[in-house]
Image: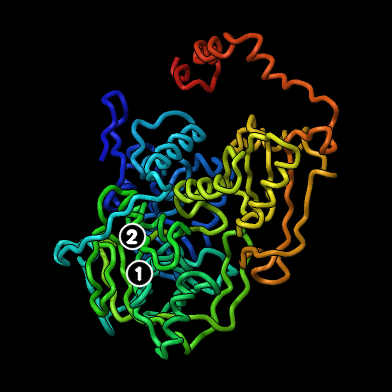
Amino acid sequence: MNRPAPSEPAVEYGPFDSLRDYVAALDALGKLLRIDAMDQDQFEATGFAYRLIEEFGYDDAPAFLIERVKVDGRWLEGPLLGNVYGGWHSEALAYGVPNPRGNQRALFRQTFTHLEQRLDATGEWPRIQPVDVASAAAPCKEVIHTGDEVNILDLPWIQTNPGDAGRYITAASVMVEDPELGRNVGTYRCQVKGPRKIGVNAEIGQHAWNYFMRVKKRGERRLPAAVVMGADPITFALSTSKMAGMGEDELDIAGGLRGRPVELVPCETSHIKVPAHAEIVLEGHIELEDLEPEGPYGEVYGYMGKPKPENFYMTIEAVSHRRDPWVINSFAGITKLTMGIPQLVTNNLNYRKTIPSLVEFFRPTETTGVVIASIRKRVPGEGMAAGQQIAAADIFGKVVIVVDEDIDIHDKTQVFHALGTRWQPSPAASIVAQTKGMPLDPSAPQRWLTSKIVIDATRQWPVEGGPAEWPDVSRVILNRDSPDTAALVDARWAEYFKHWKNNPSSRNS
């Protein structure tokens, strides 16, 4: 791990081998809030998560760790963690950005550049295959229960919303294998149905679902699986991403991003191998024909998903975990689930292959369904063409906004200012009547189908229906005609606030 310079706080930077090492670093960075107890029978943790984001915003809200949680009338020992990957500081920390500095946007840029430099000459992520370690040395094997000893109700999974069908495992990795395709690691919600049973919600077309269908086609009724809670941050990030294609091993890419292999140990009841430093491993078989009702569940859009009359479930045959295991809850639709910059690096790389004018593509965490791109416009119609290509390729993007290169697409004020001052709805908008969309979108009348709108908020040239002349931007004039102003303000910034009552340095004076 990279140690900071002596002038910095004593914070360890990743990559980390375990969730606990990462959370300890968050704590040292001042980004972890510890809470003694919360009554989830009154949905206290959920209410707190909403209020936390309202008070601090997505970028600056700290992670939180609850020591004890009341669930179904019982006080369960935690800890239960939330918002563990909120804010771009979390990704800078986890990916080991050297000496990260500045505000959240600066941290994003540093981390993006750091990861972009990891791509090889062909634009591929580095890959390092996992290695096996002895079970005796694996923290996830400190406690093992099998058969009738198993009771996952004793672990602090929670029901996040009153409308949910019950308690859910929301931030774990489901691991399955296929003789031809190899390993798949993906994150799917898992309803806690009993001491030895959980639902597994793999949507149609997702990799796990494709694996399930291959097994059924071979005439098999059950598939060995493991559900892993609390792997290291990078391994979990790969589990939640679309960076690996069918037949590609997410753990190979995780190893490449970590700079060292993911360490694995075999399950107690199957051939599947799991991350040795994980918090909890549930082992069992997913039933592929004997389906059961599942849901509803509050989804990432912030709306309740519909119940499913038939869905997969897993019979649990063994549980292994660390002593006093940690549980993460995603608080779906409230806090950020995982680290997303590597996925954005991949998106930008792929879009630049077909959109040469692309400057940057971004998918804001807090505006699910809205994506933004900036371009270096060279010819009429280029903004609309870029937006249409993104709309066709991006399953998440229902509202695609394209702006000029001088707009910082991470600054929502600048984006909305461009919408208000550079965009005319006619003719600089295009509606796609029907295309593939996210199945969880609550506004879609039919699952997997959506309409989309492309907004070309670049300055429209006269041939595109824009004005004959665009005036200069006031701040551009300031920077051009008074180039020393910004340096002067930066140099005197602290001095300006010396008499302000909220200045920390003046509170005791």
- Which amino acid type is marked by label 2? Leu
Q: Which residue is mark 1?
A: 183
Q: Give the number of callouts.
A: 2
In the image, taking residue 498 as reference, residue 155 lies left or right, namely left
Q: Secondary structure at mark 1?
A: strand
Which residue sits at x=55%, y=45%?
352
Give 201 or 158, whichever is nearer the viewer. Answer: 201
Which residue sits at x=65%, y=57%?
392
Residue 251 marker: 2
Answer yes or no: do the residues labelled 1 and 2 have beta carbons within 8 Å?
yes
Question: On screen, 209 above or below 274?
Answer: below
Give 481 or 276, whichever is nearer the viewer. Answer: 481
Name which quarter of the figure residue 24 lies in: top left
**Quarter of the image that includes the C terminus:** top left
Instruction: Give percent across and percent down for residue 314.
Output: 41, 80
Instruction: Give percent across and percent down for residue 1.
Output: 25, 41
Question: On screen, 288 above or below 27?
Answer: below
Which residue sits at x=40%, y=50%?
124
- Which amino acid type is marked by label 1? Arg
